Amino acid sequence: MSSAMSTAESDPAADPAADSASAPAAEEPTPTGQMLRIWQRFRTDRWALIAAGYLGLLVVVAVFAPWLAPHDPERQDLLQAFGGPSWEHWLGTDELGRDELSRMLVATRISLLAVAEAVGIAVAVGVPIGLLAGFRGGLLDRIVMRLNDLVFAIPALVLVMLVIAVLGTGLGPSMAALGLVFSTGFIRVSRNAVTAIREETYLAAAQVIGVPTGQLVRRHVLPNALGPIMVQLALQCGVVLTIEASLSFIGLGAQPPDVSWGTLLAMAATSIQGADTLLVVWPGVAITVTVLALNLVGDGLLAALKPGRGRRMSRIRPGRRRRAETVPQPTPTATTTTTAATEPAREPDDAEPLLRVSGLTVTAGETRVVSDVSFDIAEGEVVGLVGESGCGKSTIALALMGLLDDQRRVAAGSIRLAGTELVGASATDWERTRGHGLAMVFQNPQTSLNPTMRIGDQIAEPLRLAGHSARTARAEAVALLEKVGVPDPARRARQYPHEFSGGMAQRAMIAMAIAGRPKLLIADEPVTALDVRVREQVLDLILDLRAEFGMAVLLVTHDLGVVADACDRTIVAYAGELVEQAPVEELFRAPAHPYTHGLLGARPVALTGRRLPTIPGSVPAPGQWPDGCRFQSRCAHAMTDCSAAAVPTITLTGDHRSRCLRAQEHPWL
Ligand SMILES: Nc1ncnc2c1ncn2[C@@H]1O[C@H](COP(=O)(O)OP(=O)(O)OP(=O)(O)O)[C@@H](O)[C@H]1O
């Protein structure tokens, strides 16, 4: 076994993708992660950039309006009424001889303040509610969204009129009412953004290191939901500006002596004649150009957000098979428990192993997707969980981590870690267990890391949660990166995930997972997404760390080659249940279930030009499992009894079990 610090591993050349990650262009750390990348894409849109510049200028004008105004905006001079543009009055004067430029400047301030009030309220109310509903999901989400639909159905102007009727005219109350109505848009946008982000693996990865909910939303969800919220913000500002102008135009908005662009428009509209037409033009142009600029900024943000989203957990599929070269000489350490198909969950005993899963059943709605799964993992043991796609491997792994999605739940059974029951544990207990008791590494490392956080900060997060100071946690993060074989760890710790190759990102994920010194590391297809040359190194790394820290490992894989290389013992899943458990060597030498035999035969080893044998048919979907043996329709050795009743698990030797009626005679050998 090579060391985690071996030359091959610490050499970026050993990881082809690492080369590109180390290229000078990619080396510079970006200062603000996701937001900076949005900005970098945004600034390539020239029109959006010009529009943003205009809006920035407008804000400056609004702030300094009283000082920028060349005249007192309220000073009347009837002799100068309706004076056209001149050196003294660049935009002319109104019907009372007041300087139009000065009035436009202060009107800018009032209009922008009105927009800020309405949109500020909309964001303050809408974003937290949307984030909470999206993050919690379930009943809360449904209630919030139905109420949202109800408020959204009320025309904004009707509600504003109602508020004005009760509280009187004025910008303050009407903009507040508008803010409440428009909060519905922010609720929807932030809720949808969070719902999408909830599927991202990096959120689950943060949960597995024990990040509490509040911090999860603040540090992992909000920064990634900011993009769509900003787009909504830009577009909503334009709408509010138009509505404010309309209200002020009909006299229900800004009240004298305050003037907004809408007020100026209304005053000018009463005196459209000859040169005075210009009085309509100034506020009209200001409103039009500002709304246009806001829309351009919104479009620019939308375009900047399009690229760069990660793949979701539900979209991650296993890659190609890996060739099994050798069968290791296993050292069985576990005491595997005896189980039967109908056996109830076992009672804990004094000699309980590190992990004891008993009768675990997971349902999706009314349908069972995993049923009556029982197995043990001893301290320091490496157990492979294998099976074709759809057999329930990931569901079992996620159930162990307490990370099943809303659709699935543990319906029965027990999961005991070091004697502590986890089924039915409170959210706080789970937060305590994840990170220290259990940790998980996912299939796709690049989507398992938060794109908006520096690698070092992500690794330091569980250490900070454990009470380390920021400085110690940062130093430990660098040490962990070094331990997992990341070259130049201090510099790499300051980088963002997109600057890491697949192999390096998986090493960083592993560093994050082991930061809390977990007793059991669950690795769900940890090398499937990696380049074939990097797979071996990452697998070696996991085994080296297991030896160093004494942690047990549950290696979820569809690849028996990985099992042969890395595991002490194997459990085989088929159609939501376990069909065989055995030490690796015994499983490869004398498989006691025809499904295991089929999987072994389908390995691309020692090919001699003939076609790769496959198991005919496919795994029956949950809800379509037959009575009796679930493998019967694909089995060449099935008998009448196989469909008669549920097949119990029988024990062949102390730690070799099979769920097959013909396990003793094994006619497939
Ligand atoms: N959220 C869900 N709601 C309903 N059914 C689900 C859900 N997730 C998975 N399933 C079903 O549960 C079964 C087991 O899926 P699971 O992902 O655990 O299998 P797997 O062996 O890990 O497959 P893969 O290797 O493709 O990930 C599948 O039939 C799948 O369709």
Image: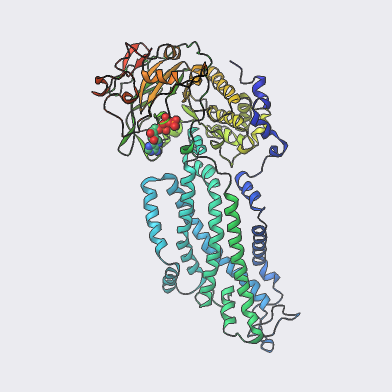
Identify which residue is drawn at 68% across, 76% down.
Answer: 101
The residue furthest front is 610
Above or below, comparing residue 261 to residue 551 in the picture? below
Residue 55: percent from left, percent from top: 64, 62
| Residue 358 shows in the view | no
| Count of marks, rendered view | 0
Q: Quadrant of the N terminus?
A: top right
> Which colour assignment does the render follow?
rainbow
Residue 637: percent from left, percent from top: 32, 18
Identify which residue is drawn at 48% across, 74% down.
Answer: 169
Residue 297: percent from left, percent from top: 61, 58
Residue 599: percent from left, percent from top: 43, 21
| 75 with respect to 423 (left or right) | right
Q: Nearer the viewer, residue 53 or 590?
A: 590
Q: Nearer the viewer, residue 552 or 606?
A: 606
**Residue 648, picture quadrant:** top left
**Residue 410, picture quadrant:** top left
| Residue 536 shows in the view | yes
Above or below, comparing residue 554 to residue 582 in the picture? below
Q: Quadrant of the C terminus?
A: top left
Identify which residue is drawn at 58% across, 75% down.
Answer: 258
Above or below, comparing residue 234 to residue 668 in the picture? below
Q: Quadrant of ligand 1?
A: top left
Q: Nearer the viewer, residue 403 or 503?
A: 503
The residue furthest bottom is 79
The residue furthest right is 87
